[in-house]
Image (cartoon, rainbow, N blue to C red):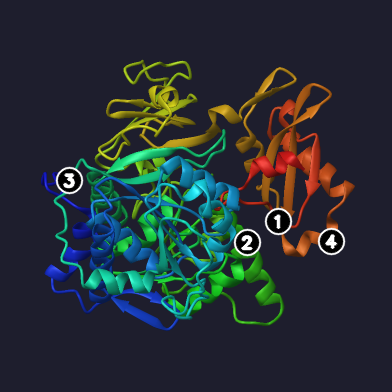
Amino acid sequence: MTDFPEEFNLADYFLFDRLREGKGARTALRFGERFYSYDDVAERSRALAGYLLQMGVRQEERVYTVLPDAPPFAWSLYGTFAAGGVVAMGNPHAPTKDLQYVIEYSRASVLITTDLAAQGLCEYLSGEGGRHLRAVLLVPDASTGEDPEGHVALPDFGDAAFEALPLSEALKIGRRSEARLPVTKRDDLCMWLFTSGSTGRPKAALHMHRDFAFNTEVYAKGTVGYREDDIAVSVPKLFFGYATGTNLFFPMAVGACSGLFSERPTPENLAKAIAMYKPTVITNVPTMMGKLLDHDDVLRSEGKPPIDMSAVRFQLSAGEALPPALYERFVGRFGGEVYDGIGSAEMFHIYATNRPGDVKGGALGKAVEGYELRVLPRDAEGPGAEPVPAGEIGVLWVKGDSVALGYFQDRERSWKTFHGHWCRTGDLFKMDEEGYIWFGGRDDDLFKASGVWVSPLEVETCLMNHEAVSIAAVIKWDDGGLLKPKAFVVLRPERCEEAGEALATELQNFCQRTLSRHKYPRIVEFVSELPKNDRGKVDKKSLAAL
């Protein structure tokens, strides 16, 4: 079903419709040993919607949700949808200045966050920063299994005009509200998804209610096949649209369960979540897949039980390239299938992917049904340009009903990216004769070394084919005005003691035998881990700053 009625709301589609289907008693969320049914989530969502309406929040006003992966995240989103508001999401552990930027940029009328994050924002919100706010609603910064609706210490916001209270108190007020839920349209604004900010400040891609339902139907249900009996766990956090889909929206669209953990996604914490929830679906990223392999190696070397993924039906991978060598190691160790795909904030979610019965190692699969892909020349100004020949590199363009309206407050960038039904992704790909697409890096990542174009991804993939390398990242390095590749390498645990000049030379020679000689990394630096941004991707801006 991809033809949605004119009157349409995501709170119905993802949540309230499950009650109408008689699934209200099913477990929707787990948080440690705490269980929340669909009835529980729906009741709290309706209560929050009542509070927002009573506070005078108007349709399409922004509600900024800055929460960890805990149950209140769910009713914060669905309550906002039901009230006709627009969801914007943020990382509660982000620097205060980043949260301030979004509060100002979005002109949010309500902020929902933790008491800990609010402490850092207190001075800012007490002054000009709080001028658009009607309310600040707080939840405790609860560890997994603790009460996410427990006691909250309210900061002193001085004489601020907005109301500040625990979210649990707002729900009590909302339960008494007689405000009627508004009628929303399928093409009403409902959510802002932020770009990663790799080329500047993050910008919000503006999405409508239908966008999320469309992708859920064609990708989650129609392509990878979420089921009612699934239990989902995610490495990326819910504020990142990739995980909002895979670990909240998609499971709830079919009556399944999401297992949440609020701690930082380390291999140790993920292993605990896997042991606790026994998930059937895991949302992963390549960096964590490498770390899980290394952690499992350590467990085995210490005589401890290895990570048990026997319940997992499939894992999803996106966000960064999954090198074939890592894919083979991971599947060979843990079994199951990994469906590598690509999506974006501009399209909400994954529009090309490997899938059950059709996995091609190293490729990102084919277009999800309902989407159309074209690989066009880098200088193409519109989707009608002649595609590059099969097997040649170009820029990927995608067409589909989940495409965003544009970027908020950025017309110049919107004109370059959005062309009606089409989106210019800025990602380099080649498409083979069978329609499988192969990632070649970001168009703006390419640089010339000794007059030859270098794709960092190509060098990274080569390095990870070496038996000593767990994961690698390559950046451009300025050597007296000349750009050259520099590699940061994390070694496998059993090879860590070999870090040094001899192994660096061996890796350089390995690359020279495989790649054009000008592409090999001129510097190899061994590190214990690679920095990541709040999306779980390797943070190359931090590496460059080193």
Residue located at (66% from left, 76% from top): 300
Can residue 467 be seen in the rendering of this structure? yes
Q: Position of residue 437 (x, y in %)?
A: 42, 36
**242, 128: nearer the viewer:** 128
Q: CA distance from mark 2 to mark 4?
A: 18 Å
For label 3, the residue is 2
**Mark 1 or 4 closer to N-term?**
4
Q: CA distance from mark 3 to mark 1?
A: 43 Å
Q: CA distance from mark 2 to mark 3?
A: 38 Å
Q: Are marks 1 and 2 in contact (CB under 8 Å)?
A: yes
Mark 4 is on which residue type?
A: Glu
Q: Nearer the viewer, mark 2 or mark 4?
A: 2
**Mark 2 or 4 closer to N-term?**
2
Q: Position of residue 498 (x, y in %)?
A: 84, 57
For label 2, the residue is 291
For label 4, the residue is 497
> Is the C terminus in the top left, top right, bottom left or bottom right quadrant?
top right
**465, 102: nearer the viewer:** 102
Q: Is residue 399 left or right of residue 116?
A: left
Residue located at (60% from left, 52% from top): 95
Q: Nearer the viewer, mark 1 or mark 4?
A: 1
